[in-house]
Amino acid sequence: MSHSFSQRLAVTLVVVLLSAVLGCGYHTSGHSVRLPSDVHTIYVPMFQNTTQTFRIEQTLTAAVVQELRSRTNFQIAATNDGTADATLKGLVNYTSNAPLTYDSVTGRISSSVVTISMKVSLVSQSGKVLWDNPNYVYREQYQVSRDVASFFDESNPAFLRIANEFAKSLVSNIVEAY
């Protein structure tokens, strides 16, 4: 009798877990596209930068273009020749790199948190706003292995990794319905 109770309990738990997963809108990446079906080509001009962070707009734009190319079926237009179905515009308006934890022995910073804030919009060729976020904020923690002040140096591997993670996050928010 105890054995059948255990089986029923196990089946019930599986059903409850499946219901929870299916009921919360879980889906795999690349499905549930919410952009209009007539958008096939996206023009991504260089993002604008109003911060003091040197060339961050170039690094973020390149990461977003790479992410769009690798994760979507959209063609990415290199120039604004008027043939793109939509344009992805971005304005980097805030960056920070703040200490998060310290090494108890040396007193040096051991981890930091990077924050990037942007105004981003995807606009159709006719001028219709397809996706817009005037305050897109991305934060990520990273382990400090060298001078914190040089973090935003585009050759810094940690910054390049965060730029790529930022791009994944942004493209997911634009393309996938959550």
Image (cartoon, grey):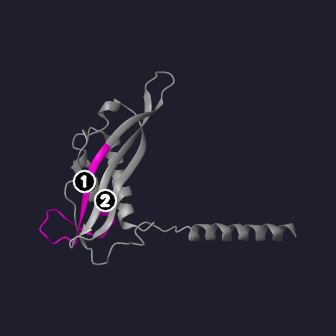
Name the amino acid, label 2. Answer: Glu
Q: Is residue 120 magenta?
A: no
Q: CA distance from mark 2 to mark 1?
A: 10 Å
Mark 2 nearby-residue class (10 Å; few <14, some 14–19, many ≥20) = many
| Residue at 28% from the left image edge and 49% from the top image edge | 92
The local secondary structure at tag 1 comes to helix
Residue closest to the far right: 1
* Picture residue at 15% right of the left edge, 72% below the top: 83
**Please, is residue 58 above or below residue 131 in the view?**
above
Q: Is residue 126 left or right of residue 148?
A: left
| Mark positioned earlier in the residue sequence (2 or 1) | 1
Give the extent of the magenta segment: 66-94
Residue 28, x across and y down, in percent: 46, 67
Q: Residue at x 35, y 53 (%)?
A: 135
In the image, 142: left or right of 154?
right
Circles 2 and 1: CB atoms closer than 8 Å: no
The dot on residue 124 is: none
Rendered position, 118 above or below 24: above
Question: Which residue is label 1 attached to?
Answer: 61
Badge 2 element: helix
Residue 35 position (above or below residue 44): below
Which dot marks residue 67? 2
Question: Looking at the image, is mark 2 or mark 1 nearer the viewer?
Answer: 1
